[in-house]
Image (spheres, rainbow, N blue to C red):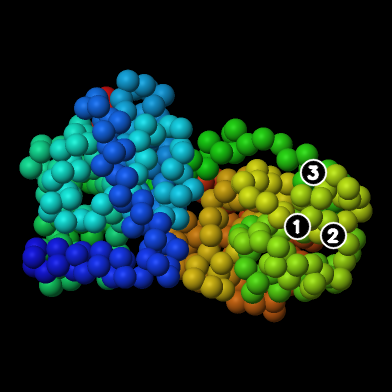
Amino acid sequence: MSWLYTFGIHLFSFVLWLVSPFNEKARLLREGRKSVLEKLKELNGDSVVWVHCASLGEFEQGRPVIEALKSKHPGKKILLTFFSPSGYEVRKNYDQADVVCYLPADTPRNARWFVKLANPEVAIFIKYEFWPNFFRSLRQSSVPVYSASSIFRKDQIFFKWYGSWFRKTLSMVRKFYVQDKESGELLDSIGINAYKVVGDTRFDRVTSIVNSARDVLLAELFAAGSEFVIVAGSTWPADEDILIQYINQTPEHVKLIIAPHEVHESHVQQIVSKLSVSFFRYTEGEKADSSSAKVMIVDTIGLLSAIYRYGHVAYIGGGFGKGIHNTLEAATYGIPVLFGPRYHKFKEAKDLVARNGGFSIEGYKQFYPLVEKIRNDFQKRKEYGEAAGEYVSSMCGATAVIMKEVFS
């Protein structure tokens, strides 16, 4: 099986090379991997902790550990690797890591030279990242491997009758810090008991974001004095159709802050074309009468996590597409969270629904009465919001456990 897996990795690398002239992500990955060797030389054999994330979402789970490590052990160097360009390209200049680079293809040769050059004292892989050849090379070099914010499902190959070779990869992990009890039980079922249920480090991250979030004055002025404000984040057209249908027919004192996932001009203009009420764009806010508008379009990035605080309810986009975006950034402010039907792969969304802090809608027919109930029934709004906020608070603390057990 080992040779078949490695052949598959080589085949993937070949296909990547073939499509790279025509595919931007493939090109970025191929070109980015060329600089890995030079970047690793910057570590100079110092005390290195290697943190690996697949992409941007996993980075947000690894980030609390990195930042706690830098705070408590400033002498250690952080090597941060990504598999995906969507993670690396956004965080390649992350100042808490000493070296940021791509993870090379998981072949035995690549794993040997990478581990030799990086020379980590500890390796932490985030969530779903389990690379057989890298794990084998780390074990041969006596480097302990930990898995943080890991989560498992029974339909994964590790738990199938034909998954014995992949189970060996999991056996090379010194300890799993899993998100939930069900993941621990699945590990038990295959004879792995080196785990602890600690939750998701992302909860620590979003709490930190809230505590350090800056004021967004324009959003504050827009929301001030309004009876009811919806903050809709990371929206797509299917989400926007529902939100705009609602805001177009509500009273003047009901307002909408909408931060689309894509902020390019054509998408913003698409939103504008559907509105029949007064609006302004965040980037043009100084020229607009923000207090009299019903809609603020956030046509820039980096503000959403701070803007949720100005809402009475949050709507999270993506639920009519591949899946919803981050619900925790909104829930941590103690407001109800709404989203579309495709949320079942997201544990935190399922937990919010179970606790009446989050609600899924199938379309406008479900959205309208639910939002009106939240708008008009202050007690229910408070109840739902408190459920969301208390859920986030109850799930914090994973980072502290990992720091104590791995680095004390």
Alpha carbons under labels 1 and 3: distance apart: 11 Å
* Res 370 visible: no
Residue located 21% across and 69% down the image: 11
**Residue under pointer 3:** 218
Residue 339 is left or right of residue 17, and the answer is right
Earlier sequence position, callout 2 versus callout 3: 3
Residue 27 is left or right of residue 236, and the answer is left
- Could you say whether the residue bearing mark 3 is in a helix, strand or loop? helix
Residue 152 image point, x, y percent: 29, 60
Give the camera-side residue of 313 and 216: 216
Q: Are marks 2 and 3 in contact (CB under 8 Å)?
A: no
Residue located 42% across and 37% down the image: 64
Alpha carbons under labels 2 and 3: distance apart: 13 Å
Q: Badge 2, how many Cα within 10 Å: few under 14, some, many 20+? A: many
**Residue under pointer 2:** 279
Q: Quadrant of residue 358?
A: bottom right
Alpha carbons under labels 2 and 1: distance apart: 7 Å
Residue 224 is left or right of residue 144, and the answer is right
Figure quadrant of the C terminus:
top left
- Could you say whether the residue bearing mark 2 is in a helix, strand or loop? strand
Residue located 31% across and 38% down the image: 39
**Residue under pointer 1:** 297
Q: Amino acid at mark 2?
A: Phe
Q: Is residue 92 above or below residue 312?
A: above
* Res 365 visible: yes
**Residue extending farthest top:** 75
Q: Are marks 2 and 1 in contact (CB under 8 Å)?
A: yes
- Could you say whether the residue bearing mark 1 is in a helix, strand or loop? strand
Residue located 62% across and 68% down the image: 236
Residue 365 image point, x, y percent: 69, 79
Earlier sequence position, callout 2 versus callout 1: 2
